[in-house]
Amino acid sequence: MLLSFSIPTAGGAAALDVAIDHFVIAGWAGRDHAAIEHHIEELAAIGVPRPTAVPLFYRVAANQLTQENCLQMVGPDSSGEVEVLLFSHAGRSYVSLTSDHTDRKLESHSVALSKQLCAKPVAREAWPLDEVLPHWDSLRIVSTITEDGREVEYQNGTLDSLREVRDLALRHTGQPQLPDGMAMSCGTVPVIGGIRPATSFGMMLVDERLGRRLAHRYTVECLPVVA
């Protein structure tokens, strides 16, 4: 899967095309056991079984990554979760933004299948990881959904609640940097008001220290469920 990113530079921006052939989602990636348990209970409330280990790494087809602004999903039961996307190119690590969009109805049957079913939106901008590592814990991920015609906050939390991306890479690959061609979705923060579907999802990675943000928005078209 070829993803295209804009990378900010002192002179403006540089284009970066990255071929991804291995995609993994890091689930249950919190640093704090209580926060992990909170998210497990959120999902248990909608019938999702407890994980067998934490963190847990789900392999998902790389062709599920997309930078389109509209997803097509069967039925009305899917929803997004904002996450940092980690990848490497030419030996350098980068971070961007993704949504672990998931079919919640299928998730109660199989988490792995529910993640595989849905496309994963990816932002069109990225930052070199080394630019944000010195203040990593202060970075913030935020998501919004549209409900009853108005935008409401769905998630908002700093990355100090999640395992640092080099730790996740090390646990999965044995090295603190992902190999070229691999991308990892690196965990999320709790939702506000309970997990629920929405047809419009906005997400941001906010760097208050350097005064910048990555952002992406997408909509969901619900296809009919035909028996």
Image: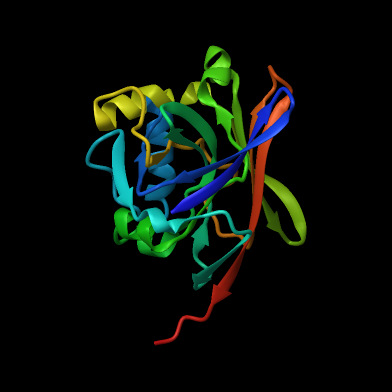
Above/below status of 223 relative to 216: below
* Residue at 34 percent of width and 22 percent of height: 176
How many numbered dots are placed on residues in this image? Answer: 0
Q: Nearer the viewer, residue 204 or 131?
A: 131
Q: Nearer the viewer, residue 91 or 87?
A: 91
Residue 221 horizontal/vertical position (percent): 60, 70
Residue 205 horizontal/vertical position (percent): 62, 34
Direction from residue 193 to residue 29 in the image, left or right: left
Residue 144 horizontal/vertical position (percent): 66, 47
Direction from residue 48 to residue 119 in the image, left or right: right
Looking at this view, name the residue that lies furthest to the bottom: 227
* Residue at 46 percent of width and 28 percent of height: 93
Q: Quadrant of the C terminus?
A: bottom left
Looking at this view, name the residue that lies furthest to the top: 134
* Residue at 29 percent of width and 38 percent of height: 56
| Colour theme | rainbow
Direction from residue 50 to residue 25 in the image, left or right: right
